[in-house]
Image (cartoon, rainbow, N blue to C red):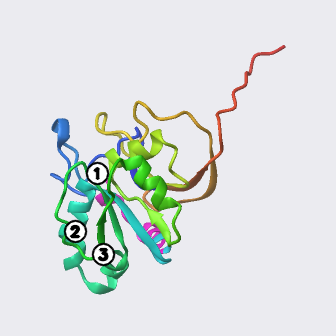
């Protein structure tokens, strides 16, 4: 799961105004002015190995409107990947190599994860991620935390998130202050106390 987050945990509409203005969200495009070479390298490394995509319907539509028309040297990995789309409806999936995940989402994704194939990456897809978190279907969190707060919006770890520990396995910081970290699940939360005996 690769997700752009504000410091206060919002993942809604990082790429531009109008991307997702649900609930009157007015800060679409909050990530754009922070992009630098370090971030290009991190994204290039993530997408430089074989992968397929697991996308919610809204993110699929955003990607499908852009990547088939982008320069081939940039778009080839995304255009070549199989796109598994989770949707409550029966969308027309015109972007090549697109497949609808049939039936109940968690069961379909669980079955998909058990097949042979390349890494399965989730980008954006806020509603889908909530399903993945509830069913503990995320194997790695690739979090891009931007030094901006927006106050309100859709949060990555929303209500219903299953409490769990995470281990940081890799991190870097961009020249613009974006913290890029890879985390893996570490089981249940282990609590303790600073209280003196």
Residue at position x 38%, y 78% in the image: 77
- Occupied quadrant, residue 124: bottom left
Q: Label 1 belongs to which residue?
A: 30
* Chain part drawn in magenta: 30-44
Q: Is residue 118 above or below residue 150?
A: below
* Label 1 close to label 2 by CB (< 8 Å): no
Q: CA distance from mark 1 to mark 2?
A: 21 Å
Percent x, y of residue 71: 25, 83
Q: Tell me if I can see residue 38 in this picture.
A: yes
The single residue placed furthest to the bottom in the displayed view is 73
Nearest to the eye among marks 2 and 3: give it. 3
Q: Label 3 belongs to which residue?
A: 97
Q: Nearer the viewer, residue 186 or 118?
A: 118
Residue 42 magenta-highlighted? yes
Nearest to the eye among marks 1 and 2: give it. 2
Q: Label 2 belongs to which residue?
A: 64
- Give the main secondary structure, helix, strand or loop, of the magenta stretch: helix
Indicate the quadrant containing the C terminus: top left, top right, bottom left or bottom right.
top right
Q: Is residue 110 above or below residue 127?
A: below
- Occupied quadrant, residue 84: bottom left
Pick whichever of labels 1 and 3 is earlier in the sequence: 1
Q: Is residue 172 above or below residue 151?
A: below
Q: CA distance from mark 1 to mark 3?
A: 30 Å
Q: Secondary structure at mark 2?
A: helix
């Amino acid at each position: 799961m690769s997700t752009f987050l504000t410091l206060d945990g919002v993942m809604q509409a990082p790429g531009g105004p109008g991307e997702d203005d649900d609930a009157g969200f007015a800060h679409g495009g909050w990530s754009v002015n922070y992009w630098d070479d370090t971030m290009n390298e991190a994204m290039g490394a993530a997408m430089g190995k074989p992968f397929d995509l697991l996308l919610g319907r809204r993110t699929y539509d955003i990607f499908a409107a852009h990547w088939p028309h982008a320069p081939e040297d940039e778009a080839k990995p995304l255009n070549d990947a199989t796109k598994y789309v989770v949707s409550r409806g029966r969308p027309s999936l015109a972007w090549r190599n697109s497949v609808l995940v049939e039936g109940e989402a968690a069961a379909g994704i669980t079955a998909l994860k058990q097949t042979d194939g390349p890494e399965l990456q989730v980008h954006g897809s806020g509603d889908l991620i909530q399903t993945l978190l509830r069913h503990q279907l995320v194997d790695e969190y690739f979090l891009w935390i931007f030094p901006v707060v927006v106050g309100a919006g859709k949060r990555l770890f929303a209500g219903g998130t299953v409490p769990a520990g995470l281990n940081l396995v890799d991190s870097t910081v961009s020249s613009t202050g974006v913290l890029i970290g890879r985390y893996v699940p570490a089981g249940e939360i282990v609590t303790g106390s600073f209280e003196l005996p």
